[in-house]
Amino acid sequence: MEKAMSIIKEALKNIISNKLRSSLTMLGLIIGIMSVILLVGIGTGATTNVTSSVKSLGTGTLTVSINEESETTLDYEQMDELKKLTNVESVAPYKNVSGTTSRQTITSKNTNILATIPEYITIMNLKLEAGRLLSNIDIENTSKVCLLGNSLTDTLFENTKIKDIVGQNISIEGDQYTVIGVLTATGSTMGNNIDRNIIIPFTTAKYLKSDTSINNLYVKVEDENKIEVTKTLLENYLERNLRITSDDYSVTSQDSMLDTMSDITSTLSLLLGGIASISLIVGGIGVMNVMLVSVTERTKEIGIRKSLGAKRKDILAQFLAESLILCILGGMIGVLLGIGIGEILQTFGFNFNATAMVIAISFASSAIIGIVFGIFPAYKAAKLNPIEALRTD
């Protein structure tokens, strides 16, 4: 134990006496560890965000999508037929269109406008902060009314209280729409930021150069245990009534969608981690090169120590300790920087989630690199002939 402490003290002394070289040695490793934590953390954060987004719809919801290239689509009138299918509780078609919205001198270009029906609000678990929701009368009368996403109110109605926004008018593609309600902030759901959306009656989409054809809808089931049966009924309905094949449409449950998205994001996390790991290897090579230079510079010192009785294993342990300490210090700094920068990125809207396992693996990698890339320089130092070493100037 005493001998080990002596080796560590001597290693620390040599590291401190060459501050610039030690700092440059650690730099590559610091960048590598920091990159791994940041990239994997962002990938994990994206996975978590996707998972929560899909789960927000619950497990009792089916998503029906018909390819845009398909020659046929569902009609609004067919929604009543879908509602009659066994185990179907409600159906909510929706269309996404883009348009310019404005109020007085304030303009918001390319605003996402969602045309749908009242059932959509229930299926998506959206809440109302002020005003009222869409009604069937709005659908029947193709009323020019709208619901505003929470953060969009900050753009169009600066410094205006939410309750005072209800009843006011905004312009969508030159037409006046009355704000009937403001939604509670919900964030992104299924990749769609509801807080930045405007929701209008489905039939009103015709005023925005759209039609009532349907390519996308959500289906809420009554019994989640029978969701696969309901999925089959929907598929049969589409193929029978639209005369399309399975290549032209998809009916997915939230569980299958969650599995698919989790696989994709997990693969992305691994890919990002693999790319970042390359910088770790580069950092390790840098450690080895600097340690080799250190061996060359300290050849005479090694010769003196050997002539005084130091064994090969003592020299080997000394240089290996220096390499290991440098890498552990670099790993600690890299971990702290990675977590710190990740927390800062969250304030800019990035999803960052550095798990304890990722941090532990990253830190352990720095120690492993210290050993693996420090062995060769340490071995080279240990096998030096003391007589030849003493002759070195």
Image (cartoon, grey):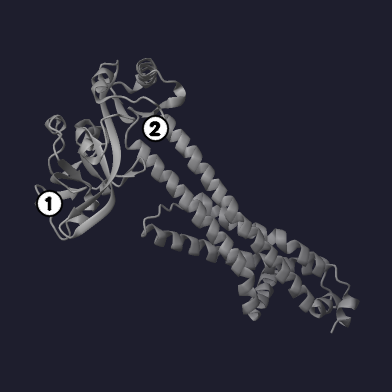
| 208 is higher (above) or lower (below) than 123 | below
Name the spot of residue 176 as percent of width and height, x first.
14, 47
Name the spot of residue 265 as percent of width and height, x first.
48, 43
Residue drawn at x 13%, y 57% as measured from the top left: 160
Find disc 1 in the rendering and name its residue: 165
Q: CA distance from mark 2 to mark 1?
A: 36 Å
Q: Nearer the viewer, residue 306 or 374?
A: 374
| 42 is higher (above) or lower (below) than 335 | above
Find disc 2 in the rendering and name its residue: 68
Q: In the current view of this chain or complex, which residue is farthest to the bottom?
A: 393
Find residue 108 and report its image quarter: bottom left
Res 1 seen here: no
Residue drawn at x 22%, y 41% as measured from the top left: 199
Q: Is residue 55 left or right of residue 81?
A: right
Name the spot of residue 380 as percent of width and height, x first.
81, 67
Q: Nearer the viewer, residue 75 or 346?
A: 75
Amino acid type, callout 2: Glu
Q: Residues within 10 Å of mark 1 (few under 14, many from 20)?
A: many
Find residue 245 and report its image quarter: top left
Res 18 seen here: yes
